[in-house]
Amino acid sequence: MSSFPFRGVLLSQQSARATVRVFASPGSWIESDALVQCDRVAALDGMIRVAGMPDLHPGKGAPIGAAMLSSVLYPFLVGSDIGCGIAVFPIRIKRPDAERIAARFPDLDRALTPDDEEWPADIPAGHTDSLATVGRGNHFVELARVDSVRQETTLSEKSLVLIVHSGSRGLGERILRAHTEVHGAGPAADPAAYLKAHDDAVRWGSLNRRLMAARVGRALGAEVGEPVVDECHNLVEVRDGLYLHRKGAARGDSRDVLVAGTRGTPSYLVAAHAGAEANFSVAHGAGRKMSRSDALRRGKAKHTVAELRRTKVGSLVVCGDRQLLFEEAPTAYKRIEQVIGDLAAHGLATPVAVTVPLVTYKTRGHR
């Protein structure tokens, strides 16, 4: 994978009928492979506009951190984790001691059963597998402190929030597989049927985040409020008769969005106000700077497991999977401050509040 600092204020070009524009500033790290993927997407039939966010990076067949507007619906542009998103819940804990909280975090690798208190009355698509589990990769559940407030918001400085990043688990994968086994990377033969299944997965992802928040609250003896943010960043939106695909990009039209940093850096709550040129979208996080294999190789040469389980900001990481611990190290990601700066510089979002992690849960599992 080749990479380089992004040298232009933005990339704007015409490829086939589609415009490609990357909202990144000088000094931003944008991989050339991601730009190539943007061009390939722009050449698809019916594509109108491709907008790359400042966290843009290569994905499996399609860029991550991109919003893509088309007259044709392409399921592969959303991917398998349909409905993946980030929710932010106010939480009250009497004694927010990180060591104590890390020890009491529930096992979010174990799926709920009907005997559990949190078992819901209605489950989208009847999909009960992996219910209320976080998954692997970049998914996480994090207890964080509101470090500063920059604009009017319901959150207050020094208050605590629970940040939950997860999606539809096996349901989204099943939906994409059913399409690709017949049509590969081609368009949806029956858009209405795909969208019905897609919408179930989006609802499932939101339910999954709420259930995990409830499990954490019960395990910690904490009071968890209604989410102040619950925004999906892997979905298709039907907008003015067109299909707006987002893969690793959050809806950015007049709403608050949590742009996630890493387990060792702040995250930013932003007021999003992106327009049509950005496909009404904003970044969803810091974005990977290294592949997982590179992060594993470089991380093992520089860090011990113990070092990675306590971050530079003093937070603790609950992760029994050593490989995942290295793959998801903070150094594997771009600078969140640069991403937020790019969003602000291009008029896509305004910072509202900053959160700092106290405990980040990845997995209880051991490898």
Image (cartoon, rainbow, N blue to C red):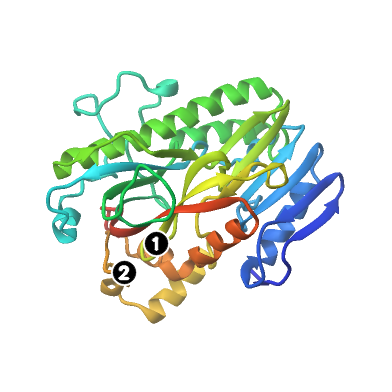
> Quick check: can you spot residue 293?
yes
Residue at (71% x, 60% y) in the render: 35
> Quick check: can you spot residue 55?
no
Is 322 displayed left or right of 334 in the figure?
Answer: left
Assign a secondary structure to mark 1.
Answer: loop
Tell me which corner region of the image, top left, top right, bottom left or bottom right, holds residue 309.
Answer: bottom left
Percent position of residue 364, x then y: 25, 53
Disc with the residue nearer the chain's start (2 vs 1): 1
Considering only vertical position in the picture, is 198 above or below 162? above
Circle 2 crowding by C-alpha within 10 Å: few under 14, some 14–19, many from 20: few
Q: Please identify the quadrant where the C terminus is shown.
A: bottom left
- Mark 2 to mark 1 CA distance (whole Å): 9 Å
> In this figure, which residue is indicated by the disc labeled 2?
313
Circle 1 crowding by C-alpha within 10 Å: few under 14, some 14–19, many from 20: many
Q: Nearer the viewer, residue 100 or 121?
A: 100
Is 151 displayed left or right of 15 in the figure?
Answer: left
Tell me which corner region of the image, top left, top right, bottom left or bottom right, holds residue 4.
Answer: bottom right
User: Which residue is outermost to the bottom?
Assistant: 301
Residue at (26% x, 32% y) in the render: 112
Q: Residue 361: which disc?
A: none
| Type of the residue with mark 2 | Val
| Type of the residue with mark 1 | Pro
Considering only vertical position in the picture, is 299 above or below 100? below
Assign a secondary structure to mark 2.
Answer: loop
Is 61 displayed left or right of 284 in the figure?
Answer: right
Q: Are marks 2 and 1 in contact (CB under 8 Å)?
A: yes
Percent position of residue 11, x then y: 76, 60
> In this figure, which residue is indicated by the disc labeled 1?
266
Tell me which corner region of the image, top left, top right, bottom left or bottom right, holds residue 191.
Answer: top right
Residue at (27% x, 36% y) in the render: 225
